[in-house]
Amino acid sequence: MRLLVTGGAGFIGANFVQQTVLEHPDVTVTVLDALTYAGNRASLDPVAGRVNFVHGDIADLDLVDELVSGVDAVVHFAAESHNDNSLADPWPFVQTNIVGTFSLLQAVRRHEVRFHHVSTDEVYGDLEPDDAAFDETTAYNPSSPYSATKASSDLLVRAWTRSFGVRATISNCSNNYGPYQHVEKFIPRQITNLIGGVRPRLYGAGHQVRDWIHVDDHNRAVWAILERGRIGQTYLIGADGELDNKSVVRMILEAFDLDPDGFDHVTDRAGHDQRYAIDATLLRTELGWTPRYRDFRTGLAATIQWYRDNEPWWRPYKASAERAYAAAGETEINPVL
Ligand code: NAD
Ligand code: DAU
């Protein structure tokens, strides 16, 4: 199989490419990535010489058409992915997540190429503490400019499947953790703060709940869908990993042998989603997928070790990520606990 992977220099995409080279040696991989602030060529160093890399924009219709004409399938990870950035400047999210996905859909339609669209649980909005988890029938209700543009891209995929017969599947996954994640995101931000002797930063009171899954489990689910998923079907991906943010920060501090209360509360995110949770029954029963990382503390410890061992990978990005948070007005607060 010849595979085009968009966003293959980003967090999940780079892990997907590495896993693919290792576990699917018969597959020829081409990566298309614009190398935005979130893309890092070094994330593909472990597979250097074993993948083709194209530096370009998914919204470039001519480039995308040419690349898609030479492959059997596209796995589409490329996106603007950070909620906080979408609050500061939504435009790149509209351009990449909506226009970029449109460009890919036109090409896979023209060349009759299989398409897998990687999306997020955030398209469903958020849950109350006692609500049932999201499943494939949950109504779309996005909260942020990021999640609204991801929801828009999902709807384009559904329309191109129904109206033009594009052979597409969609997956909506919960929060990923693991190696190669940008230091702007919650877990790497706190780990790299602590490596530098800086206290973790918790938004508001830290009661928000996320449903954590290891990136390798996410990517094995993507492979299961690519190989065995039903065309036109959406699959939710999650590993029953619900935790509130404060508990995660305390676990990270404990892993560093520090006082678990040694963090600061900072300005809360505007429109902050309170809880995400995934019911992955369809993926488990129909495609036989199960997560390999069942203990979050163990996966977290390995992730912390990875950031300790790979400071040259993340250090160049740390100061600018922190400057962006400061510019957005992040300050210490005393929340009502
Ligand atoms: P990321 O921000 O780490 O990486 C995004 C990659 O896309 C980068 O390499 C970037 O250079 C590239 N890119 C951005 N704009 C581009 C463009 N116009 N053309 C080509 N390349 C472009 O993101 P991530 O966390 O790896 O997320 C990957 C995908 O998975 C996204 O679609 C995201 O919505 C989805 N997702 C992420 C999570 C998560 O927890 N991180 C969970 C569920 C779904
Ligand atoms: O649910 C899937 C989504 O998960 C993906 O679609 C997104 O691409 C991905 O970024 C992630 O979105 P979140 O907004 O949940 O992730 P983030 O890492 O930004 O934040 C996780 C939680 O931690 C969230 O409740 C905000 C909080 N937070 C975040 C940062 C950066 C903090 O308390 N402190 C922080 O410093």
Image (cartoon, rainbow, N blue to C red):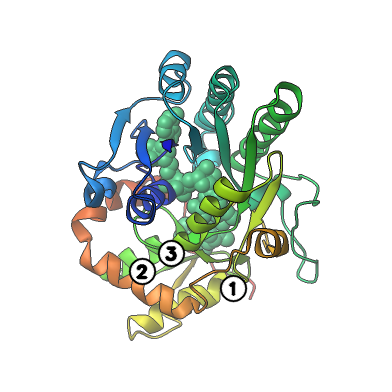
Instruction: Name the spot of residue 287 as percent of width and height, x first.
Output: 64, 59
For disc 3, the neighbor class at 10 Å (few under 14, some 14 to 19, many from 20) is many
Q: Is residue 267 visible?
A: no
For disc 1, the neighbor class at 10 Å (few under 14, some 14 to 19, many from 20) is some
Which picture quadrant has residue 33? top left
State the SS at label 1.
Answer: strand
Instruction: Name the spot of residue 142 as percent of width and height, x first.
Output: 70, 44
Image vertical order of residue 2 relative to residue 25, above or below: above
Q: Mark 3 sits on what residue?
A: 187
Kind of residue indicated by mark 2 = Thr
Locate residue 137 relative to residue 290 in the image: left or right: right
Cβ atoms under marks 3 and 2 closer than 8 Å: yes
Residue 243, label in figure? 1
- Rendered residue at 55%/56% (across/down): 221
State the SS at label 3.
Answer: helix
**Disc 1/disc 3 C-alpha distance (Å):** 12 Å
Residue 303, label in figure? 2
Kind of residue indicated by mark 3 = Ile
Q: Closer to the observer: label 3 or label 2?
A: 2
Q: Nearer the viewer, residue 279 or 283?
A: 283
Q: Nearer the viewer, residue 166 or 9?
A: 166
Kind of residue indicated by mark 1 = Leu
- Rendered residue at 31%/28% (across/down): 55
Locate residue 124 relative to residue 100 in the image: left or right: right
